[in-house]
Image: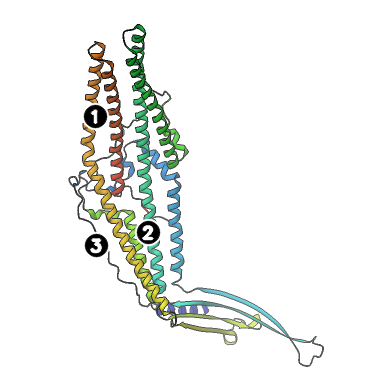
Amino acid sequence: MLYKIITSAVAGLLLFTAGCSFVPEYKQPAMPVADTWPDQLPAYETGSGQTAADIAFQDYFTSQTLQQIIAMALENNRDLKVALLNIEQAKFAYRIKKSDELPVIAGSTGLSRQGVPEDNSSSGEAYTTDTSMSVGLGITAYELDFFGRVKSLSQSALETYLATREAASSTRIALVAQTADAYVNLLAQRKLQHLAQETYKAQKATYDVIKTQYDAGSTDQLALAQAATSTESAKASIYRYKRLAAQAENALVYLAGPGVYDLIKAPETPSETPSEIIDDIGFLSRLPAGLPSRILLARPDIQAAEHQLKAANADIGAARAAMYPTISLTGSLGFAGESLSYLFDPSRSLSWAFSPNISIPIFNREGLKASLDVATVGEKIAAARYEGAIQTAFREVADQLVARKHYKGQLDAQNALVSATRDAYNLSKARYDNGIDDFLAVLDSQRSLFSAEQVAIALKQAYLSNLINLYKVMGGGKMDTSNAN
């Protein structure tokens, strides 16, 4: 019987508290950017109609080594772990706020024993003893949410939780791109180091020939000095690129953990070409580019900004509701008696208490109004941040699309320049060997060739970085948090 009474009371309270809400109707701000990007490529280049967010990183990055490195980074990176733990923290905070919508029902039991001196006892040694026992259930200060204050706070906590999930997804996308870019940088530095070593070998051989000619008196000291200058310059470049390659390795270890060493270890022979070089690495470069700018709304950072806007919107409802009376209930239902023999006899020991409380804001109304103004301004700030996130994303995509449009032509032109410079070097060396030109022409052509090859490698790195960043800014590899615990 007691269970039925408590259940009916709780059900009645829940029905009674289904009140109104002062949360403003949410309206998604209009897109503060154009519908399409400038200078974008033809629509749906892949022919599949997919967006970048639909393409997993394992399908976009074709290098198996890079796929393994990214997987290790996702497993071991501390920044991503912090982001995932933030999801857990926000989820528990939401559960706390959600629980405030339900009454807190607690069981209680007690035993008291009291001795009072008898009136006719002069010595005070004779006592009358009273014993009281009780058992029951009680509701502690349950707020009747007539104006939706508690529900608004719960909604705000939910949106904050959802924003945290999207922030973790954004962190994951950034980590995937950062890891891929770091790997491309490592391959570029190793290719540059290999180029410097090969250039040094060629120029050292040239120096040895000039030295022999100088010892034989068939050339002058200026040619020998010029050959030495070119050789030592190439040698200095070797150490420079060794340093940069080692730093690139450190960057990958920071991102993916020490286990990545087995995947990125340098060749045993310094002059040996690495097993995977920057010229071989390829991506699924044909991303769909001719898509409307509204696809940006699926980017997790923009989703997070919108959830924060919705949370600020709910805060306005809570601040409005706080200006109205607050009604809370405290009550109990149970049994109390002097002995166990009739403690649970409803006819003799049933007890109850009911204590409603109403709080009406009077003298602190200005403070509550100021809180509402703060919440209103906070919602405007969140809206501006949301629009700013969209504008930033639009610019990022537009920049990467423009870069992709022109990088390929620039890279082809640079490779043609390398080929032409190599021909010029071979011609100038042949003319020098035949006594037609002096060594200065050979030296200039050597330096030009080395410089052109360096630029070509750096340009290939920039092109690959563009493909990585385009995948990132279009929301590629978004983490699925629908099953997050």
Which of the labelled discs sits on residue 156, or is there none? none
Mark 2–mark 3 contact, CB under 8 Å?
Answer: no
Frontmost of labels 2 and 1 is 1
The picture quadrant where one finds residue 450 is top left
* C-alpha span from label 2 to label 1: 46 Å
Q: Residue at x 48, y 78 (%)?
A: 4
Residue 453 in view, yes or no: yes
Q: Residue at x 36, y 44 (%)?
A: 176
Specify the amino acid type for callout 2: Ala
* 73 left or right of 440 in image: right
Q: Which one is earlier in the sequence, the residue at label 2 or at label 1?
A: 2
Image coordinates of residue 298 in percent, x first then y, are 29, 55
| Dot 3 crowding, Cα within 10 Å, few <14, some 14–19, many 20+ | few
Image coordinates of residue 151 in percent, x first then y, are 40, 71
Image coordinates of residue 59 in percent, x first then y, are 31, 42
Quadrant of image for the C terminus? bottom left
**Residue extending furthest top?**
216
Residue 286 in view, yes or no: no
| Dot 2 crowding, Cα within 10 Å, few <14, some 14–19, many 20+ | many
Q: For mark 1, what is the residue?
A: 415
The picture quadrant where one finds residue 187 is top left
188 or 214, nearer to the observer? 214
Q: For mark 3, what is the residue?
A: 30
Q: Which one is earlier in the sequence, the residue at label 3 or at label 1?
A: 3
Q: Residue at x 29, y 53 (%)?
A: 392
Q: Is residue 8 above or below residue 233?
A: below
* 434 left or right of 80 in image: left
* 161 left or right of 432 in image: right
439 or 145, nearer to the observer? 439
Mark 2–mark 1 contact, CB under 8 Å?
Answer: no
Provide the secondary structure element on which disc 3 rests: loop
Specify the amino acid type for callout 3: Ala
